[in-house]
Image (cartoon, rainbow, N blue to C red):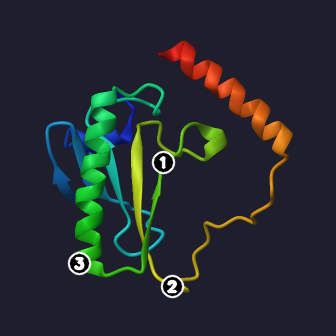
Amino acid sequence: MNDCVFCKIRDGQVPSMKIYEDERTLCIMDINPLNSGHCLVLTRAHAATIFDADPADLQAAITTAKRVATAQRAALQPDGLNMLQANGPAAFQSVPHFHLHLIPRWTNDGKGFDWKLVPGDRDRMMKVGEKLRVALRGAA
């Protein structure tokens, strides 16, 4: 993909602070960090979203995420960690290349990422759940 900034980072055309790489993934520091230590795990193969990504690349990405998160915990000693993955503009995906955000969190760090817990409509949840079951049977 010629205009993908993450592909350009992968190929060395755009500078980045790479902290880890293997045959399927790389991890870079986020240039717009939510907190200190915020980094991104990218698949080497271009895939815009989780829907487009090869399952082996997704497995590699989560393995790399665990490795990097463990390093974040050891080096930075955060109180918690957010792992975020967005797909498409409605989900606020800013770069159309599959990636995972690993965001160290500290108690009272002043950052958001919360929402009010509002009980769902049980009947609607059951109907939607059944639609998903049917779709999963069809995808098998």
Amino acid bearing label 2: Thr
The structure residue drawn at horizontal position 37% and vertical position 79%, both measured from the top left corner, is: 78
Q: Mark 1 sits on what residue?
A: 85
The structure residue drawn at horizontal position 25% and vertical position 66%, both measured from the top left corner, is: 70
Q: In this rendering, is residue 84 above or below 74?
A: above
The structure residue drawn at horizontal position 34% and vertical position 42%, both measured from the top left corner, is: 6
Amino acid bearing label 3: Ala
Q: Distance between the residues labelled 2 and 3?
A: 17 Å
Residue 75: mark in rendering: 3
Q: Position of residue 132 (x, y in %)?
A: 64, 27
Report crowding for label 2: few under 14, some 14 to 19, many 20 or more residues within 10 A (C-alpha). few
Report crowding for label 3: few under 14, some 14 to 19, many 20 or more residues within 10 A (C-alpha). few
Q: Mark 2 sits on what residue?
A: 107
Where, by quadrant of the figure, is residue 52 drawn?
top left
Left or right side of 135 for 119: right
Q: Position of residue 57 (x, y in %)?
A: 29, 33
The structure residue drawn at horizontal position 43% and vertical position 67%, both measured from the top left corner, is: 33
Image quadrant holding the N terminus, namely top left
